[in-house]
Image: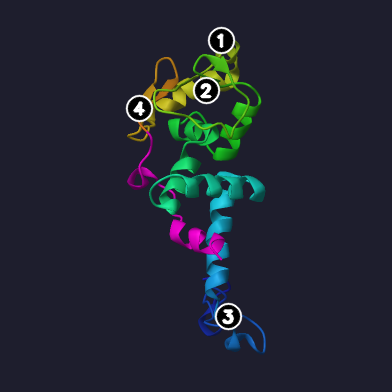
Amino acid sequence: MLKGEKCITNCILDKRSAPPGQHAASRRRISDRALQLREKQKARYTYSIMERQFRRLFAEAERQPGITGENMLVLLERRLDNVVYRLGFADSRRQARQLVEHGHIMLNERKTNIPSCLVKEGDKISWPEPGTKTEYYKQLVESIKGKTAPDWLSLDKKKLAGQVLSLPTPDQIEAKIDAKAIVEYYSR
């Protein structure tokens, strides 16, 4: 393997069951509050949202009828930067956010530079005329042929334009986030 004879007796690749240290075996159990906080932070980092904005989004989800956790996930999915990512215009949510902030995306034929803008049913997402001349756009035309959009979005691969067919349902959201834990975190 790595160092011949040394690997037979003391292999570096074998993982130990306990972390290093004298008292590592006596680690404390993670509390429910810590697990809830981890889920909240995972959602925040996944969608690149600051705490104040996330809290406002949660308050809006609470005001809506239905299950608060599912409402919150739907609101997160409806953000413009996330829709740009889901359509395949960007490889990551951070890149999608940058595309929106730099004015490379149009929402309903209007230039928009606000990534937190919530899209509605029937909204159209497209590229402005100067944006179609960029090198990134030309590469995107070639790479988007193999990508597919979620069921709640439609994608015109020739024009590189998308449309929101319907609002996403909790079943259509691909994020692996425990919304119930986030609701429990904020309800304390």
Answer yes or no: is residue 178 visible: no
Where is residue 149? Give x, y as percent: 38, 32
Mark 1 or mark 4, whichever is nearer to me: 4
In the displayed structure, would residue 119 be above or below residue 41?
Answer: above
- Queried whether the magenta region covers residue 170, the answer comes back as yes
Q: Nearer the viewer, residue 59 or 29?
A: 59
Q: Which residue is under mark 4?
A: 165
Amino acid under label 3? Lys
Amino acid under label 2? Gln
How far apart are the alpha carbons under marks 2 and 3?
A: 49 Å
Amino acid under label 4? Leu
Where is residue 103? Give x, y as percent: 63, 21
Q: In what element is the residue under mark 1?
A: loop
Q: Nearer the viewer, residue 27 or 50?
A: 50
In the displayed structure, would residue 159 be above or below residue 79?
Answer: above
Task: Please tell me how crowded label 3 is: few (under 14), some (14-19), or many (20+) other residues with Cα within 10 Å.
Answer: few
Where is residue 57? Give x, y as percent: 55, 45
How far apart are the alpha carbons under marks 1 and 2?
A: 16 Å
- Quarter of the rendering containing residue 110: top right
Residue at the spot 50% in from the left edge and 34% down from the top edge:
85
Q: Which mark is residue 139?
A: 2
- Quarter of the rendering containing residue 131: top right
Whether the residues at callouts 1 and 2 have beta carbons within 8 Å, the answer is no
Q: Which mark is residue 129?
A: 1
